[in-house]
Amino acid sequence: MELALDDNGVLEYIKIDIPKPLALDAQHLTKWRKDTAKSRRVILEWVRDHIVPNLHGNDTTFRMWKALIDLFKSNNDAIKLAFKDKSWNIQMGKNEPIIAYLSRFS
């Protein structure tokens, strides 16, 4: 998705929160609106339909991107600890084929 945003020249809109320019500066305001609309359109085209409601209500592309990252980022310590415990307890048996051993990871 970052490549699509970069190809459209709006990658910086997800990197930093670019505030809306003042209404007095019409040229910058018009450019900001066009770039924001373009970047929002790229993001909405790349995500699946069931994710779109999680992104609405964010007024800038940066906040949309942050909501998307937070949606897929796992911060749950219980999940991390369970995975760590499971990975520590898995040992390959003496006569076990490698395929059977690796299939236990999934």
Image (cartoon, rainbow, N blue to C red):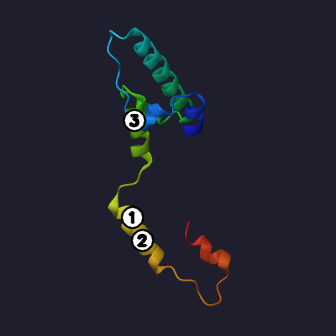
How far, Cα to Cα, is label 1 from label 3? Answer: 29 Å
| 2 vs 3, front mark | 3
How far, Cα to Cα, is label 1 from label 2? Answer: 6 Å
The residue tagged 3 is 16
Amino acid residing under circle 2? Lys
Amino acid residing under circle 1? Lys
Q: Which quarter of the figure has residue 102?
A: bottom right
Q: How many marks?
A: 3
Quick one: label 2 or label 3, which is nearer the N terminus? Answer: 3
In the displayed structure, would residue 92 be above or below residue 16? below
Element carrying mark 1: helix
The residue tagged 1 is 80
- In what quadrant of the picture does the C terminus appear? bottom right
Badge 1, how many Cα within 10 Å: few under 14, some, many 20+? few
Q: Which quarter of the figure has residue 33?
A: top left
Q: Nearer the viewer, residue 10 or 90?
A: 10
Q: Is residue 1 visible?
A: no
Indicate the position of residue 54 as horizontal and vertical percent values: 40, 35
The residue tagged 2 is 84
How far, Cα to Cα, is label 2 from label 3? Answer: 34 Å
Q: Nearer the viewer, residue 13 or 101?
A: 13
In the displayed structure, would residue 26 be above or below residue 19? above
Element carrying mark 2: helix
Say whether marks 1 and 2 touch (CB < 8 Å).
Answer: yes
| 1 vs 3, front mark | 3
